[in-house]
Amino acid sequence: MRIAKRAVGRSSCVDRPGGWGLWPCAALILMFAVAGCTHNPMLGKWKIGKREKEVETTDIDELTSNIKTSSGATGIEFRKNSIVITGGAQNHVETGIDYSVQELEGGATDVRILQPAKGDTSADIDMLHIAPDGNSAQLESRSELVDLTRAGP
């Protein structure tokens, strides 16, 4: 019995003998897609709790000045590029926000909140320390220390 040989063209890397095929290309694309996509556990709505430190200062950023006790603010929503402060006479939106996320040992996370400073070339930086469970945090600025609890997504 005679078996006919089939002609196979070898025009792609998939057909090469001993070749890896398209897997390296797919892995490389996936690697670049995932790079820079750090999960930010701070995003979402937070309820303002106890304020532990409130010091008067002349150099105050928008976030700090709009969550002071006198503002009546009761909540903060951290969005991808902005912050919405709720509960006062009116909601306040701060735009141009960047975040720097650092995951710590034990599951806690520190998030630096980089806000554009007015009349200055440098950004104002506040720090949010998020507990490992992701449901409580402490917002720390130069003039204020505020406890936050998760209020929603």
Image (cartoon, helix red, strand yellow):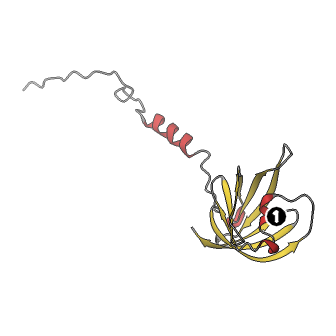
Residue lying farthest to the front in this orientation: 89
Q: Quadrant of the C terminus?
A: bottom right
Which of 124/62 is in front?
62
**Residue 107 placement: quadrant:** bottom right
Q: Residue at x 84, y 42 (%)?
A: 121
Which of 67/135 is in front?
67
Neighbour tally class for label 1: few under 14, some 14-19, many 20 plus, Cα within 10 Å: some
Q: Amino acid at mark 1?
A: Ser
Q: Can you say whether 29 is above or below 104 in the image?
A: above
26 relative position to 86: left or right: left
Q: Whole-percent x and y of residue 5?
A: 17, 23
Q: Whole-percent x and y of residue 63?
A: 77, 61
Q: Whole-percent x and y of residue 42?
A: 66, 62
Which of 134/151 is in front?
151
Q: Which residue is mark 1?
A: 65
Q: Quadrant of the N terminus?
A: top left
Q: Whole-percent x and y of residue 101?
A: 70, 55
Q: Can you say whether 67 is above or below 112 in the image?
A: below
What secondary structure is found at the residue carrying circle 1?
helix
**Residue 9 placement: quadrant:** top left
122 relative position to 32: left or right: right
Q: Residue at x 19, y 23 (%)?
A: 6
